[in-house]
Amino acid sequence: MTPLLRGPITGPKAFAIFAGFFVVIIAANLVLAVQAVRTFSGLVVPSAYIASRAFEAERRAQEALGWTVRAAIARGTDGGKDEVVLVLTGPDGRPVADAVLGGMLRRPAVRSADQTLAFTFDGALWRAPVTAGPGRWVLVLTATAADGTPFRQHLALTAE
């Protein structure tokens, strides 16, 4: 045993233990803070005011489309591929066929599971093949109407 660990706890030993504890805590906090800043700067948009004005204009245009969206993850049968099935209806209740759809299927907290979706229209439904394990997913839908109006929506999905 080293001389530092032998004998009674004296004032200098108690101070060394106390200081060592705080050095470890401060070092861990610094490492975590540096990693947090490297992975996300905190800046979402350069100007929140300009972004909010653009958001309001886009929101009004999107609402004017009158589209309704429902989505689900359909399990493939007999070893077939899973797919995101999307019902996109216009204000008249009929399927929207003349839009350009895209999007991402994401796990709420894991970026490595993100999948880019390529939708095709089958006459009634929009379908996109995916590999979706069980659990919670978020569908980030992006679409463009025939008149060029952008449409964005986030939908929470659950795969069994």
Image (cartoon, helix red, strand yellow):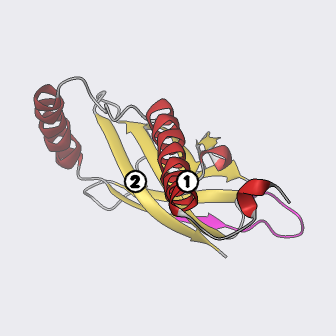
Q: Amino acid at mark 1?
A: Ala
Q: Is residue 111 left or right of residue 1?
A: left
Residue at 81% across, 55% down: 2
- x, y percent for residue 12: 53, 55
Residue at 61% across, 57% down: 84
Q: Please give the residue where the numbered disc 2 appears in the rendered image.
A: 154
* Vertical relation: 92 (above or below) 135: above
Q: Please give the residue where the numbered disc 1 appears in the rendered image.
A: 16
The quarter of the picture where residue 70 lies is bottom left
Q: Is residue 80 magenta?
A: yes
Q: Please give the range of residues in magenta.
A: 72-82
* Vertical relation: 44 (above or below) 79: above
Q: Secondary structure at mark 2?
A: strand
Q: Whole-Å distance between the Cαs marked 2 and 1?
A: 53 Å
Q: Is residue 117 magenta?
A: no
- x, y percent for residue 61: 18, 39
Q: Amino acid at mark 2?
A: His
Q: Nearer the viewer, residue 136 or 101?
A: 136
Q: Is residue 39 left or right of residue 79?
A: left
- x, y percent for residue 117: 60, 42
**Would residue 124 be visible to someone looking at this image?**
no
Residue 143: mark in rendering? none
